Image (spheres, helix red, strand yellow):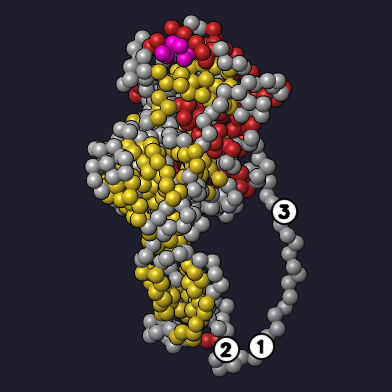
Amino acid sequence: MAKRMWRYGAGVLAAGALAGAGLPAMLGDGGANAAAPRMIPAPVVTDLGAATTRQAVTHAAARSEAARNLMVAPEKLVPKKVTAARPARVVTTVLDSDGRPAISVRTATDRAGAVGLVRRAQRTASALGVELDVPVKASAVPAGTDPLRSYQWDLDTIRAPQAWERSTGAGAIVAVLDSGVNVGHPDLAAQVLPGADMTTGTEGPAHDVFGHGTHVAGTIAAATGNGTGIAGIAPDVKILPVQVLNDNGSGQMSVAAQGVVWATDHGADVINLSISGASSEQSMTAAIAYARSRGTVVVASAGNDRQKGNPASYPAAEPGVIAVAATDQSDNVASFSTAGGYVDIAAPGNAILSTYIQGSGYARMNGTSMAAPHVAAAAALLRSADPALTPDQIEQTLESSAVDLGAAGRDDDYGYGRLDIATALAALPTPAASPAAEPTEPTPAEPTPDAEEENLPLEIDAGLGRRQATFGESTGTSFTVTMVGDPVADRPVNLCVSVDDADFTCSSAVTDAAGTVSWNQLATAPFRVRLSIPGADATATVAYDVRATVSITADGPDAAAVTIGGVDGQTVLLQRFTGTTWATVQRFPAGEQTRITGLTPGARYRVALPMTRRFVGVISPAVQL
């Protein structure tokens, strides 16, 4: 479980690999969520001052490892070629008085500028390290062309259904640091919290153009028992989406490190990092140490470079991280899964079916990126079952309960073995049961001619209990009353409606020949429809979240018109595509019709409308002026 500090070359800008791969995509919406967006303060380089003993112990190894970069001539750290197309990102990491990493990034587009930035960074008081940023990006692992299957072999392999008898993850939060999450997906809509986009420095609407993060999130916490799609491993967990990769699935290690700090500060119990870079970076080392000091478990994919000689993958090889290798349906190590002394545990990572951004909304993917969320979900189940568990205790429980594969004991392919969630939960102390009441003898009742029929329970089938409608849409909600599966016609019922959290307004109705009662409602605010049966213990409620609408159209060479349905005091973000990501260029108050001028001719723009208490947020399709 203990992991040594891996040494790294700070001057090497090696391409990383995001440990996973996507299938061909089909058109779908990116979705959006979160409260009104606000800028995330830029990291500030702060004088460390007097460090506490705990901080000194926690980061002593990190500081000694990175200190050599403070003494190296800047010219030796900077690549020989620095251009606007290949800029140098100089990362400086310090700790504030609370042990929180403060990560500062400066960019130079020529070598002289980069040397100057390194020289100034080396003079920063109490700096842990100065280094060049490590790229991380997506790399394909072929998933084949077989049609998607309607079952998930991985859940049975790790014994997730048996684990649900003890824990479903209620109360736990897993941060997915990835390409974003499509919160409009029906299997994720009720599972995702407001998050942050570290690539633009904003808190606000989440989206996922690349699809990788949506797949990871579904493996962890897709809604279970909702009549659609797949089952998540920890179905009552909440997902905290933190975008650290741009819309092309690439990014920088320092941005991911900032995401680790943000997720920790916003209540994450577990952080999943299905990303991979070629070398360590001090900003990430410090961020992980900070997360663990706050009780957060950090899980990362071990990498997909088995065919390239098994180079170490970061952040998986960082101290304190649970590094996850991948297995296939036969419990063999996957052909792509990187082996190494830093691998802690293995989990299914081949042909994993999960949520996706396009087409049917589901796809099979391969990679240690797909294996890591299995372990992240397992860690959340343990934390939910016993909130007092520390990160080390959770890791030890997962490793000691794993199914030993390969060479006896720990090995570089499987670590301590393949994940077994049911055994891990069984290893925890069983909660004390409440004293059972003394049994009493039932009193026989005199039968009556209709007693058998009257004692049969009435049931109400309402379908999905939580749904999403678009602003202005006419919705229809149907309830069917049955007795032992047969429809009950001409049954008096009470049909009640609550709009915008107001009190229910009720009216009487009668079921039709099919046992059904229906209600139509225009979606202009969130609402609930409830059916109850007088004289019977049967009630069903369907709740509707209402998704706002937003569009942007060209209105001249340098102007655009924005139309919004579901105005609720939002601050709207106008975003322009920079060639690699979407950058917020303007904010304005929401209105039904808004004309924006002074835009760049030929540029692509879109509008992000944040979530409010009343409306689900949304991102518009892009328009090119």
Label 2 packing within 10 angstroms: few (<14), some (14-19), many (20+): few
Label 1 packing within 10 angstroms: few (<14), some (14-19), many (20+): few
Image quadrant in which you'd find residue 302: top left
Q: Can see residue 21?
A: no
Checking the image for residue 432, the label placed there is 3
Q: Residue at x 64, y 21 (%)?
A: 48
Q: Residue at x 43, y 32 (%)?
A: 275
Q: Secondary structure at mark 3?
A: loop
Checking the image for residue 451, the label placed there is 2
Question: Which quadrant, please, contains the C terminus?
Answer: top left
> Badges 1 and 2: C-beta atoms under 8 Å apart?
yes
x then y, percent, for residue 604: 28, 40
Q: CA distance from mark 2 to mark 3?
A: 40 Å
Using the image, determine if residue 50 lies above or below residue 375: above
Residue situated in front as seen by the camera: 335 or 324: 324
Q: Is residue 32 magenta?
A: no
Farthest residue, direction front: 598
x then y, percent, for residue 414: 48, 31
Q: Secondary structure at mark 2?
A: helix
Amino acid found under the numbered disc labelled 3: Ala
Which tag, 3 or 1, sits closer to the chain's start? 3
Using the image, determine if residue 360 lies above or below residue 471: above
Which tag, 1 or 2, sits closer to the chain's start? 1
**Location of mark 1 (residue):** 445
Which tag, 2 or 3, sits closer to the chain's start? 3
Tell me where the magenta segment starts and ends, as one range. Answer: 113-118
x then y, percent, for residue 540: 51, 72
